[in-house]
Image (spheres, rainbow, N blue to C red):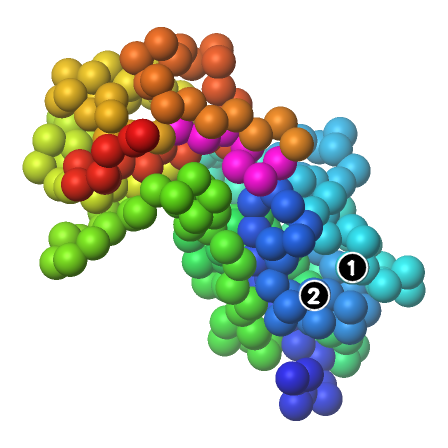
C-alpha cells in the first residue's frame, strides 16, 4: 500500500541490522519512491553508512542521496548544531513537496539517531515511521534463542547505565537484552559469570552481516574480540545446547 499523501512527507525508515533480505517489504516500497534520502554517518570522512549499504540496491537511481554526519558523542553543542542543520535541510526538501527519507539501522524507535530528528520535526512536517527488525529480535530468531516467556517482563537495557543498577537487573530479572555493551564489555561478562549465566546468555557481534560472530562460551570473550555492534541476550529459563 502506498501512502495517500500528495504533499511533502518525511519518512524515518528502519532497515534492520545487516542482511538486505531482512528489510521489510514496506520499507523497500517506501525507499523506491523517495526523492531524497538522508544517510547518517558516524564519521565525517565516511560517504555512506551501514544503513545505506543494507538498502542501496533498493534505491532508485533518480533519488538524491545526502550523506550527513551525526556525531557519536555526548557533546551537546556539537549534536545540537548537527540536528539543527539537518532539520532545516529536511524541512526545505519537504516544503518542496518531496518524499524525503532517513534510514537507520535496526528499528527507528530503539536507541536510534532518528528519534532526535523526530522530536524536532513531528510538529513541523508530516512524518511516517517505518519499523525495522531490531538487533535483539534478529539475534534471537537467527539463533533459536527465545527472549521471554510466560509472565516474565522483557527488560531492554543500555549497558552504559550505572554499574550497580545494571548488576541488580542481571541478578533479579529473567529475560534481559543488553545493548550498547562495547565500552563496558569486560565488566558485563564478569557480572554474567558471577551470576552463573554462562549457559543462559548469548553474545553476537555484527548480527546478519558478513562479519557476524556468535559467542556462546562467554567466559573466554574479551572486549578486543567483539565489535561496536554487539548485543547480549539473557534468558534464565533457556539453556544453550
* Residue 57 appears anywhere in the view: yes
Position of 211 with respect to 133 (left or right) is right
Give the class, few, some or many, for how many residues have Cα within 10 Å of label 1's Cα (few <14, many ≥20): some
Q: Position of residue 46 (x, y in %)?
A: 74, 33
Of the 4 image quadrants, the one containing the C terminus is top left
Q: Is residue 177 above or below residue 114?
A: above
Residue 18 placement: quadrant: top right
**Residue drawn at point x = 66 percent, y = 32 percent:** 210
> At x 56% / y 74%, what residue is drawn?
128
Q: Which of 88 and 166 is in front in this view?
A: 166
Horizontal and vertical percent position of residue 135: 46, 44
User: Which contiguous range is marked in magenta?
Assistant: 203-209
Mark number displayed over residue 58: 1
Mark 1 secondary-structure assignment: helix
Left or right placement of residue 65 versus residue 17 in this view: right
Instruction: Find out whether the residues at labels 1 and 2 contact each other: C-beta distance under 8 Å.
Output: yes
User: Regarding mark 2 in the picture, which secondary structure is present there?
Assistant: helix
Tell me which residue sits at (62%, 27%) in the image: 211
Question: How many neighbours does mark 2 have within 10 angstroms: few (below 14), some (14-19), or many (20 or more)?
Answer: some
Look at the image and tell me in which quarter the N terminus lies: bottom right
On screen, residue 185 versus residue 5, left or right, reads left
Q: Residue tagged by mark 2?
A: 28
Q: Relative to 91, say whether 134 is above or below.
A: above
**Relative to residue 171, is residue 94 drawn left or right?**
right
- Choose the circle earlier in sequence order: 1 or 2: 2
Toward which corner of the image does residue 2 lie, by quadrant?
Answer: bottom right
Residue in front for this viewpoint, 115 or 25: 25
Amino acid at each position: 500500500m502506498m501512502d495517500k499523501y500528495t504533499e511533502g512527507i518525511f519518512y524515518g525508515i528502519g532497515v534492520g541490522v545487516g542482511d538486505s533480505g531482512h528489510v521489510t517489504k514496506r520499507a523497500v516500497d517506501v525507499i523506491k519512491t523517495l526523492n531524497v534520502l538522508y544517510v547518517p554517518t558516524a564519521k565525517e570522512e565516511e560517504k555512506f553508512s551501514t544503513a545505506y549499504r543494507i538498502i542501496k540496491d533498493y534505491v532508485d537511481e533518480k533519488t538524491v542521496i545526502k550523506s550527513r554526519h551525526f556525531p557519536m558523542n555526548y557533546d551537546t553543542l556539537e549534536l545540537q548544531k548537527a540536528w539543527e542543520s539537518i532539520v532545516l535541510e529536511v524541512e526545505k526538501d519537504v516544503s518542496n513537496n518531496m518524499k524525503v527519507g532517513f534510514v537507520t539501522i535496526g528499528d527507528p524507535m530503539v536507541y536510534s539517531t532518528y528519534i532526535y530528528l523526530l522530536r524536532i520535526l513531528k510538529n513541523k512536517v508530516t512524518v511516517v515511521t517505518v519499523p525495522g527488525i531490531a538487533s535483539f529480535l534478529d539475534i534471537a530468531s537467527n539463533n533459536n534463542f527465545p527472549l521471554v516467556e510466560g509472565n516474565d517482563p522483557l527488560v531492554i537495557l543500555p549497558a552504559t547505565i550505572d554499574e550497580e543498577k545494571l548488576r541488580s537487573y542481571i541478578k533479579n530479572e529473567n529475560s534481559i537484552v543488553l545493548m550498547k555493551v562495547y565500552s563496558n564489555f569486560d565488566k558485563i561478562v564478569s557480572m554474567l559469570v558471577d551470576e552463573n549465566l554462562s549457559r543462559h546468555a548469548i553474545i553476537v557481534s555484527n548480527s546478519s552481516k558478513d562479519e557476524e560472530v556468535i559467542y556462546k562460551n562467554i567466559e573466554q570473550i574479551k572486549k578486543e574480540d567483539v565489535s561496536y555492534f554487539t548485543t547480549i541476550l539473557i534468558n534464565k529459563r533457556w539453556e544453550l545446547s
